[in-house]
Amino acid sequence: MKKTNKKLITYAFIDSQNLNLGVRSQGWRLDFTKFRILLSEKYLVKKAFLFIGFIPKNKELYAKLEKDGFILIFKPVIENKIHPKVKIKGNVDAELVLHAMIQYPHYQKAIIVSGDGDFYCLVEYLYTKRKLAKVIVPSRKYSSLLRKYSNSIVNISLFKRKLA
């Protein structure tokens, strides 16, 4: 029986806050339009799920991200009023893991975009099932739990000239 040459279906699951803060900590800003193009061209990503806290005043940003080809998964945010400042918290870890598993039957490879050790169990599971394509980390400082998968780790700063 002859094997058919199927196209590999790759999905990306992106922790937007980890990505954004990691890149900014290195002194540059990520162009999300260019990032989506890089995911499509370099890694052949069909669907890119971007997990992000929902803030009503950011509707224009959300529309632009959707126009760029991201599928937005929103998390309600919590405002924590400390002193005169308001700190907004929108932790998306559980949503990212849940959606990666909901989508599991629909992709052959997954890219996780985060350096957060909370995704260790997901990375480990995808790796053991041979579904992990890459872990794109947004800075040199990422969880030591992920170092076990160093062959799959790519630092986004390698693409700084293309993405800044």
Image (cartoon, helix red, strand yellow):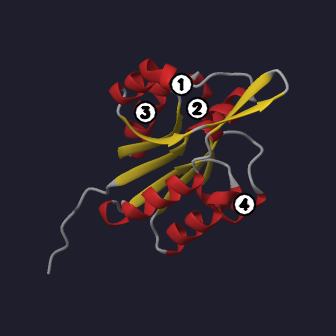
Is residue 34 rendered to the left or right of residue 77?
A: left
Q: CA distance from mark 4 to mark 3?
A: 25 Å
The residue that mark 1 highlights is 162
In the rendered structure, which amino acid carries the disc numbered 3?
A: Arg
Question: Is 107 situated above or below 61?
Answer: below
Q: Nearer the viewer, mark 3 or mark 1?
A: 3
In the rendered structure, which amino acid carries the disc numbered 4?
A: Arg
Q: Nearer the viewer, mark 3 or mark 2?
A: 3
Q: Which picture quadrant has residue 140?
A: top right
Graded by Cα atoms within 10 Å as few (under 14), some (14 to 19) or many (20 or more), the crowding at tag 1 reads few
Q: Nearer the viewer, mark 4 or mark 2?
A: 4
* Residue 9: x %, y % from top left: 32, 55
* Residue 82: x %, y % from top left: 81, 31
Q: CA distance from mark 1 to mark 4?
A: 25 Å
Q: Nearer the viewer, residue 164 or 59?
A: 59
Of mark 4 and mark 3, the one earlier in the sequence is: 3
The residue that mark 2 highlights is 159
The residue that mark 4 highlights is 147
Q: Are marks 2 and 1 in contact (CB under 8 Å)?
A: yes
Q: CA distance from mark 2 to mark 1?
A: 5 Å
Instruction: State the residue at coordinates (56%, 65%).
Output: 122
Q: Residue 102 shows which numbered tag? A: none
Q: Residue 36 shows which numbered tag? A: 3
- Element under label 4? helix
Of mark 3 and mark 1, the one earlier in the sequence is: 3
- Element under label 3? helix
